[in-house]
Each structure stands twice: as C-alpha cells, then as structure tokens.
Amino acid sequence: MAFKLPLFAAIAAAALCASSPAIAANTDTIAKWSETSAARADNSAWGTFLEKYVVAGENGDPNRIRYGEVSKADRQQLKDYVETLAAIDPTALSRNDAFAYWANLYNALTVNLILDHYPVKSIRKIKPSIFAIGPWGMDAVTVNGETLTLDDIEHKILRGHFKDNRVHYAVNCASVSCPNLRKEPFDGARLDDQLNEAAHDYVNSPRGAAFSAKGRLTVSSIYKWFRKDFGGDEQGVIAHLSLYAEPALQKRLKSADDIDGYDYDWSLNDVR
C-alpha cells in the first residue's frame, strides 16, 4: 500500500525542493584571494548609481534609496555592472579587494532584486515559495562557474572565509533596520576605514543600540542572530558595541549588565 502525504505536506515538500538548488555551491573554490595581485574591479558604475539614488539619513536615521525614481537606463547599467562583476575571477584579487568585491556584488544584487519587484513593502515579500521567508536562498549570480545565492555570498563566503564581524555592517538587506547602504562602493584600498566607519555609524544609531529613559538597553536583532560573531554572549556583544561607541554611549554600555531587548524593522529602506 503506497504511503500518501497529506496535501499540505506534499505541497510544502514540493515547494522546498523547487526552491533549493540541485547542487550546493562549492564556495571553497572561489572564496580565495591572491597575496600578490594588483588586479582591481571597476566599481565606477556602482558608485555613480549610489551617489545618484542613495539619500543619506540624518541623526541616526537610515540611508534610503529612491527606488521609484531609478530610470530605465540606470536599471540597465546596474544589471550590466552585476554582469561585469560576475565575469571577474575574485580569486585573482587581493584579500581586501576580494572582500570589497563580494560586498559590492551582494549589495548590487539586492538593489537589483528590489527594482525587479518594486513596489514591494519588504524584501521578505520576495520569495521563491510561500514557505520561504525571503529571497536569500534564490539563485542570484554565477561566478567562476558556481551559481550562488545571497546567503552563499554573505554566510559561506564573507562570514565563512574572511572571519571579520564587520561584514554585518557591509552587506545591506534593503531594510530600515539594516546597516546603511553607503553612498560609495567598498574599495580594497580604503576597506578598513570604510568598515570601521560603517560600524561606528550603525552602533551609534538607534538601530544599533539605544537606552530607554529607564536605562534599558535595546540592540539590533543582528547581535542576536549572529551572536557567535560578536563574542558568543551578551557581554561579548556589549564589548563589541563599546569598540565603536561614541563617549556618551560607551559610558552607558560600561554600566550595562545585560541586553534587555532586540529589535528589527524589515520595512523597505525606500524614501519616505
């Protein structure tokens, strides 16, 4: 007698299979870099796009993107930029240039994804099946013969191989509570300063860390989801925040025994 799945379970199983790549990307073959290479990626087109469409936030507000105003020509130039990056061999770049390459590619792919589905209220509304929580598991780009998802780039390559928790301030998930999409591309020659600046901006914004009038500390859910990247416990997170906190916030963090809450707003980082 054949075993039959309930209808809902059968649909769920089919959807999960359909949304999963047949062969997982072998990121070990492409998440490498050269110790001697002087090769550089040309990010000028991405820089022009960012300067034109990213609106800088003030007083801790997030940077926002004018998605609805992106011209047809600029959309095509963005797609061309992604194709140009995809044609580069990232293993021929230096470590810092490779990090910048993957961060820029991730961010450009995310903006392109939003534009392909705009208008949309949240990136989480874009998904391969009704059971998915977002688009991060969808095939996004092919580099050196490996088809990659956004998750592959962020978690397997950037987090997995570069071992730098500042990656969380580099990649942008098109959401209000995400660290800013900067008005300039990441550049290997200035990478350390750019990452430190991005970390500083986020930590000192209400989206990163904030104390209530009663002294309760609320931080971004990023520090909960990826706690192991920030010391593994709440004290590790607080110590990390203190590294980038301005004096007033740093003083309050020194007296914080624990974290009272976590918060994250998935609303699209569109202009108001």
Image: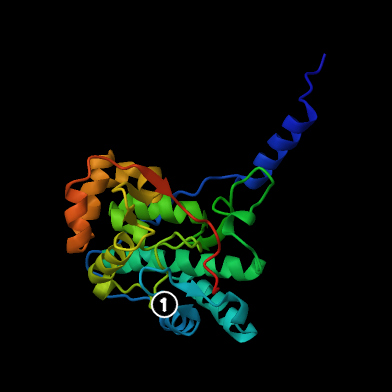
Give the residue at x 30% y 59%: 203
The answer to whether residue 94 shows anywhere in this view is no
For the residue carrying disc 1, how many other residues have a C-alpha within 10 Å: few (<14), some (14-19), or many (20+)? some
Residue 175: x percent and y percent?
50, 61
Indicate whether 240 appears above or below 194. above
Amino acid type, callout 1: Ala
Residue 192: x percent and y percent?
23, 67
Residue 62 placement, left or right of 236? right
Residue 61: x percent and y percent?
41, 69
Which of the two residues, 47 or 231, is positioned nearer the viewer here?
231
Which of the two residues, 170 or 242, is positioned nearer the viewer here?
242
Query: How has the structure been colored for display?
Result: rainbow
Quadrant of the rendered structure where residue 8 is? top right
For disc 1, the marked residue is: 56
Q: Quadrant of the C terminus?
A: bottom right
Give the residue at x 60% y 82%: 69
Give the residue at x 17% y 49%: 254
Q: How many marks?
A: 1
Residue 141 placement, left or right of 211? right
Give the residue at x 31% y 42%: 259
Which of the two residues, 134 or 154, is positioned nearer the viewer here?
134
Q: Judging from the image, what secondary structure is the residue with disc 1 in?
A: loop
Residue 120: x percent and y percent?
64, 64
The answer to whether residue 125 shows anywhere in this view is yes
Quadrant of the rendered structure where residue 114 is? bottom right
| Residue that lies at the very extreme toward the front in this rendered image | 214
| Residue that lies at the very extreme toward the top in this rendered image | 1
| Residue that lies at the very extreme toward the right in this rendered image | 1
Residue 151 placement, left or right of 92? right
Q: Quadrant of the N terminus?
A: top right
Residue 1 placement, left or right of 162? right
